[in-house]
Image (cartoon, helix red, strand yellow):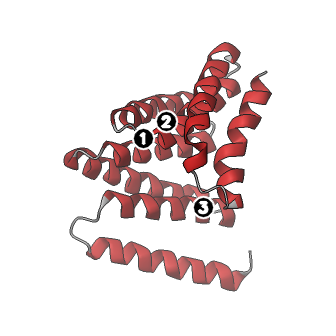
Amino acid sequence: LDADILQDLGAALNELRNNLAKAKQPPAELLIATAVVYRRAGLRTGQADSLRIDSLNLLSSAFTTAKHLGDDRSASLALGLQGELYMDERRWDEAIKLSEIALLYAQQAAALEAEYRWYAQIGKALLAKSELSASEDAYRSALTILSEVRRDLPVSSPRVFSERILPVYNGYADVL
């Protein structure tokens, strides 16, 4: 990335960090969204380590806030995204554990759009560990749920399809 773009990105992230620090108790959704921005910025700029730590801290705060408010959907998202960060580092066991807990919160919230996502994430981690049978089961569960919710997802967005739907089918094909 261009040096000017990196500088602008750094300034924007600092402003975001400062605004969050000013908020007495930011909502879990804002913490989660900010964590996602940090992760993506880290992956695109090659600064994944420092921004990953910030992202993990934000997700931890989001989980605490969500749990305190009884918001199982946000708790699920915070934990599942922490699992995703561990997936980036190939820390499969931690990713699986967090994803399984995220799945439980998603089930309590009846959040099918999160359930399929965490099943797929578990399947991907299990595949990386060469646990093919368990991976296939997880992907099959993800596909079953995805078939129920796919019509509710904003498929007009190519990004949703390429980032959320297609990887589930590709992962299942990889297992097979």
User: Vertical placement of 175 versus 66: above or below?
Assistant: above
Dividing the image into 4 quarters, which one contains the C terminus?
top right
N-terminal of the pair, mark 3 or mark 1, is: 3
The image's mark for residue 32 is none
Whether residue 52 is visible to the viewer of this picture, yes or no, is yes
Which residue is pictured at 46% across the width and 29% down the height?
Answer: 100
The residue beneath circle 2 is 115
- Disc 3 is placed on an element classified as helix
Whether residue 50 is visible to the viewer of this picture, yes or no, is no
Which residue is pictured at 20% across the width and 47% down the height?
Answer: 68
Q: Is residue 80 left or right of residue 43?
A: left
Which residue is pictured at 51% across the width and 59% down the height?
Answer: 36
**Residue 172 vs residue 2, the one in the foreground:** 172
Q: Amino acid at mark 1?
A: Ala
**Residue 28 vs residue 90, the one in the foreground:** 28
Q: Amino acid at mark 2?
A: Glu
The residue beneath circle 3 is 40
Measure the alpha-carbon separation of dots 3 and 1. Answer: 24 Å
Q: Amino acid at mark 3?
A: Arg
- Can you tell which of label 3 and label 1 is closer to the viewer? 1
Measure the alpha-carbon separation of dots 2 and 3. Answer: 22 Å
Tell me, yes or no, whether the two marked residues, 1 and 2, touch with CB atoms within 8 Å.
yes
Dividing the image into 4 quarters, which one contains the N terminus?
bottom right
The residue beneath circle 1 is 111
- Disc 1 is placed on an element classified as loop
* Neighbourhood count class around disc 2 (C-alpha, 10 Å): few under 14, some 14–19, many 20 upward: many
Which residue is pictured at 43% across the width and 46% down the height?
Answer: 77
* Neighbourhood count class around disc 1 (C-alpha, 10 Å): few under 14, some 14–19, many 20 upward: some
Q: Is residue 76 left or right of residue 50?
A: left
The x and y percentages for residue 97 are 46, 28
Q: Is residue 77 left or right of residue 131?
A: left
